[in-house]
Each structure stands twice: as C-alpha cells, then as structure tokens.
Amino acid sequence: MLAPLLVALLATAAPTASPIPAPPAATPVAQELWRGAKVGMAAKAVQDLFPQGHAPYGEGRNYALPAQDDGAQPIWQMDEQVYGRPAVATFFAKNGGLTSVILKLTGLKAHATLGNMGDARALKTAFSGYYGAPRQCFDSTARGLDQIACTWEGHGLRIGLSYQDFAGSSPFMIISIRPIPAPHKPPPVIFGRRNRRD
C-alpha cells in the first residue's frame, strides 16, 4: 500500500519539463571557397553572388568545359585577379551544390618562361605565407620542362598550384580550391569470412 502512494507522490512532484532548456543544435557552417562562394551553394546563388559572370565556356568560346574527375560540372565563370594577375574563375558543382573553384591564369605569354616561372614562384610564396608550408611541392626546370606543382592545406581548404611549360611554347597555370576531404576510413575487418577461392 505504501509503495503505490510513494510512486503517486513522486509522479506529481516531478517537473514535467526540464528547467534548463537544451542548447539549440549547432548548424554546420559551410566552408568558404572563394570570395563568399561556399561549399554546397546552388548555381543560382553563385550567379547572384557574381552577377558579372557568365555561362562557362572553353578556350576560344567554342566548346563546353569538361567535367572534373569526380563528376562535378562547371556552372559559372568570371574574370578574376589572383594577387594582381589576370585569371578566369570557374565554379564547379555536383548534386546541386558548389564543390570547387578552379582559377586559370590568363596572362602567361609564350616564350617568356623566366617571367612565367617568376609569377608561379611568386604565387607559391604568397600561398605559403597565408597557408603555411606546402604539404608537398615540386619545382623543376629540368630538360626543357618548367613546372611547379604544390599543395597546401589550411583554413579548411586544399589549395593546388600547377604550372607547366614545355620549351616555352605552351605555358599553363591553374589554381584549384576545394574543401579538405574527410579522412578515408577503411572498411572494418570481418573475422571468420574468407574471400579466397579454394
């Protein structure tokens, strides 16, 4: 008899709601890729952010740009400056959301290898000053092929700088900007299962 009465008293005395409200769930902040353009932005939002841009096109405006290796498609393009050097910025999206920005430098001149290489090394220095030492970097002028290939990680981004010029006739330099990918987790090992054929 006492036990049911005690249960009834405790039930009426207990508050129906917690006196301390639970903190609101944190909403993830989208990573900024380039001048306010953030990972996951829809194409319309990118276009509204950069109204001076245009539909993407390839060299000579006569063919479409290809998709990236991960399937991301070009959605918007505009003229840009990278540390005072002219470039074209192309925005790529996959599954309806922005994934990366590629900047192709347009001020490179054929048969001006020393100046082009100087620009590439100046960008390498500028990125190192902002993002820290590169994770990997290759800088070579061997056998008539001038090239720089460096990668930085910082501020949640992976930055790639790639410059190539063979015998001074075909200079090409791009900068890629994308979020640092999540670490790869190998599948768990399942003991007792054999994959070999007997």
Image: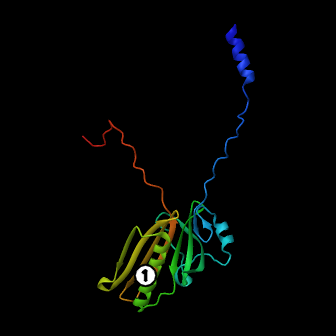
Count of picture labels: 1
| Residue located at (48% from left, 77% from top) | 126
- The foreground one among 87 and 198 is 87
Occupied quadrant, residue 5: top right
180 versus 83 height, above or below: above
Q: Which of the image's four quarters has the N terminus?
A: top right
Toward the bottom, the furthest residue is 111
Is 112 placed left or right of 6 in the picture? left
Q: Which of the image's four quarters has the C terminus?
A: top left
| Residue located at (46% from left, 84% from top) | 119
Toward the top, the furthest residue is 1
**Whole-percent x and y of residue 70?**
48, 63
Q: Secondary structure at mark 1?
A: helix
Is 162 placed left or right of 102 in the picture? left
Occupied quadrant, residue 148: bottom left
Residue ID for mark 1: 121
- The foreground one among 176 and 54 is 176
**Whole-percent x and y of residue 174?**
47, 77
Q: Give neighbour class at mark 1: few <14, some 14-19, many 20+ (Cα, 10 Å).
A: some
Residue type at numbered disc 1? Arg
- The foreground one among 35 and 106 is 35
| Residue located at (43% from left, 76% from top) | 162
Is 127 placed left or right of 29 in the picture? left
**Whole-percent x and y of residue 68?**
49, 68
| Residue located at (70% from left, 34% from top) | 18
Occupied quadrant, residue 170: bottom left
**Whole-percent x and y of residue 6?**
70, 14
